[in-house]
Image: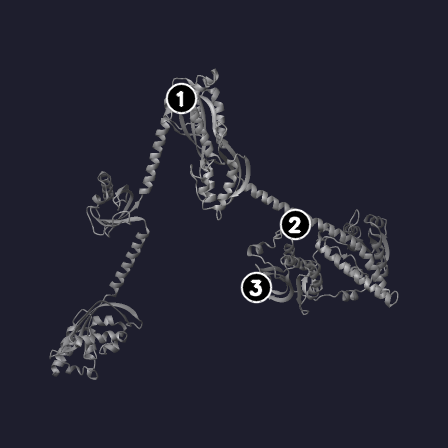
Amino acid sequence: MATGQADLFRESLAAGGECGRLIAATDWSATALGPIECWPVSLRTATSLLLRSPVPIVMLWGVDGIMLYNDSYSVFAGGRHPQLLGSKVREGWVEVADFNDHVMKVGLAGGTLQYRDQELTLHRHGRPEQVWMNLDYSPVLDENGVPAGVFAIVVETSERVRAERRTREANDRFRAFLTASNNSMYRMNPDWSELRQLDGQGFLLDTDVPTGDWIGTYIEPEDRPQLVAAVERAVATGEVFDLEHRVRQADGSIGWAHSRAVPIRGADGRIVEWFGAAHDVTARRAAEEEVRRSEARFRLMADAVPQIVWITDAAGRMEFLNRQFTLYTGADYDAFTPAEMAASFIPPEDGGHVVAAFETALRTGEPFDVEHRIRSAAGEHRWFVARAEPYRDPETGEIVRWFGVSVDIHDRKLAEAQLRELNETLEQRVASALAERKVFSDVLESSTASVTALDLDYRTLAINRTNLDAFEIAYGCRPNVGDRLLDTLADLPEDREQLRRNWSRALAGEEFVVTQAFGSAGRERRHYEVRFGTIRDADGNRIGAASTAYDVSDRVDAERQLAAAQEQLRQSQKMEAMGQLTGGVAHDFNNLLTPIVGSLDMLQHQRLGGPREQRLIAGAIQSAERARTLVQRLLAFARRQPLQPVPVDIEQLVTGMGELIASTTGPQIKVVVDAAASLPPARADPNQLEMALLNLAVNARDAMPEGGRLRITARVEQVANDHPARLSPGRYVVLSVADTGSGMDEATIRRAIEPFFSTKGIGKGTGLGLSMVHGLASQLGGALTIQSRIGIGTNVELWLPESATSVARVEDDRAAAAQPDVRGVALIVDDEDLVRMTTADMLADLGYSVVEAASAEEAMRLMVAGRHVDILVTDHLMPGITGADLIRWARNDRPEIQALLVSGYAEQEAIGSDIPRLAKPFRKADLAGALSRA
């Protein structure tokens, strides 16, 4: 190409926009295209053509597909421009290399390609994005007519495709809404001359193609004027179209639709379309029509009755009077009150008791039945009997209206006044009998009792509504008159047999009353009191039987709860009596032990006799100590010993209880005790804990009637914040009692710690054992947990907080108890002579001058008389004034006096925490320690 032509070509490139200037300024000599001066005419021509096109065009030249493109394509290239210019297409668009390889292969072979909305993933801005394009590929021929490149017109359609997809998705959601709705949706043009679309939802025929004959398709001729008028009114006013009208349904039948349409307005405010919904109200209209027909039939029937038929609301105001009322009184219907009716149509001498009787019926809900006179249009006063039954709301049971009839009995009243029924006409007797039979039927139907009558073949002669409802609740079906009752329950053999046993007795002529539960498995079972009786004809022959049943489920439940409460009370009273008896025995035993223990202790400390005598004394003291321990356990059982938490050696306590537990459970149960000597002390009341352990062992024994294994263990556990028993964080000693017995289900475990709850049967357990153990654990700051499985066994764990102090040994305490460095006068008060004598000797041994008194009253007299007393030592329970009251009196009179209360047992509440105490029996060291603390 001559230099002049090259310059002209460069100038023409400069006129081709930014991309043209870039092409002109690029040194192409290093590319497969070669210097721009050497470009063939076909390449220059194609380049000039694409640069001047407003459409995005890229040319792929040569076998490598060197890319030359215009400004429109550079916008499409995004962040890859201008590096893309002059690059090989495979390297420029790496992510679609295979696609472009195919394009080059087809184009250089002389073929063309066309793609519409072709989806590709491109990295135009450094990240992958989905794009859609219209692509047209055609070959570019060189001077010899051979394809030398590929011409590509690229039009991106991503926004349109995305918009169409959003539209389709919106349409799909709208169609889903239409499908879920039971409304038929439709669209109308602005003047309703054309139905554009209708989705009938199975109610109406669908219309997918606009039609102008929609009125002929869906509306009956006689209904069209009303519809057209409503449409014209909506079009003229632009207001919502709202009409309920008849419509031809999809199956060709005539139904009813409630149609409502709103106008859709354009930007200029004019209506461009109507969008509406037609709701199928065929069933509702049919129901309303049936109600109207039913009311019409009732009015026809009521007007045909030659008596006065009336209906009032719950307050007694008239809602309906039949035609006979107007014919007889000459007055038209009005919403009369009872008082207004009486004043207008009933003589004053009858009106008062009529109004009173009706007001009583309104108040009590009982049927209304009264005889009175009514004034006729001619002024005649005739006798009527007015009867009314209340109709109650089926759901609430509230009376909503009264149905009544006033029967003319004037002739009957006259006949009764003359000679009863001698001159009464047959018509009058029949009318009266029919009226009375109707009243009886109404009463039977409104009764709360379940009434049934069967013939000798178990066929139902009569059954009232109450019994039908109860039968359906119990058995899931409703027998009809004429059905064989036993056949009705053919699929329920057990219930069928229950009814057969009862009815067979009644049909055999027996009259009796039973109270039984009725109802099939899986349904509600209720208790009924049923009275059976025989039905006989006029000649006395048995023709069937009848039953009257009353629902007594509440009464039966109340009786069952009363029996359970009485049993609980009996157990509670038994436990209280046992506690009182045990506590009394323990108290007296303590009074007996006190002089024994005290005397032996003094003899031992005085070292009387030789070694043999000392051994005898030591043995006697050991036996007395065991007796004292036994009494403490009795007091714990009787709850006469207050909870006294101290550090307890669990290993020593459990090991010491092993022999007692083994003898309690019996030889068929193997008792295993496993408690390490290294266990830390637990904070507990040893006597109460022993009783709790014994309780758990007895429960385990009762769960293993055939024998088994009882394992008692103790361990240490560290508790964090999330313990299931809601224990405070810290270390606990866990005492476990596990058996291999019958186990408990989840429901029993949940109720196991309830007071008086027991699974052992009446007379075999108090239901207090686990409750007492649970209460003990809670008072000590611990917990009781239960794990159990049916057939495997039960593990009850008592969690006790670790004691912060070590266990104090009795021997150490007594050795450390220094003899009080006090001298003075000690007043000992006790109604038991031996106890008083022994205590006085101990006090004297301790260095006190001792004064004795046999009662609180005697002690008071001594002190009132001026007797000097430094310390007062008194028993608690004595005839007359108690020891606690004596100490309070003495402190009030002499605030400086020291006092010590000695008792066989005493509740904390009766004494108070401000009075030092010493429990009987005690030794001299115990007394010395108590006096030093007092």
Q: Secondary structure at mark 2?
A: loop
What residue would you read off at disc 2?
A: 763
Real-space Cα distance between discs 2 and 3?
Answer: 42 Å
Question: Where is residue 472 drawn, in percent x and y?
Answer: 45, 42
Q: Is tag 1's residue or tag 2's residue first in the polypeptide sequence?
A: 1
Q: Nearer the viewer, residue 788 or 539?
A: 539
Crowding at dot 3, Cα within 10 Å, few <14 / some 14-19 / many 20+, comes out as: few
In the picture, the disc for residue 721 is 3
Given residues 127 and 418, the one toward you in this image is 418
Q: Are marks 3 and 1 in contact (CB under 8 Å)?
A: no
Quadrant holding the N terminus: bottom left
Say what amino acid the circle numbered 1 marks.
Answer: Glu
Q: Nearer the viewer, residue 308 or 883?
A: 308
Q: Position of residue 19 (x, y in %)?
A: 20, 75
Q: Is residue 856 visible?
A: yes
Residue that label 1 marks = 427
Label 2 neighbour load within 10 Å: few <14, some 14-19, many 20+: few
842 versus 380 height, above or below = below
Total numbered labels placed on residues in the image: 3
Q: Residue at x 50, y 28 (%)?
A: 540
- Disc 3 is placed on an element classified as loop
Q: Quadrant of residue 840?
A: bottom right
Please name the amino acid that badge 3 sits on.
Asn
Disc 1 secondary structure class: helix
Left/right placement of residue 427 relative to residue 616 reads left
Q: Is residue 436 above or below residue 556?
A: above
Report the coloring of the rendering.
one colour
> Label 1: how many residues lie within 10 Å, few (<14), some (14-19) or many (20+)?
few
Nearest-to-viewer mark from 2 and 3: 2
Q: Is residue 470 above or below residue 801?
A: above
Depicted 578 relative to depicted 933: above or below: above
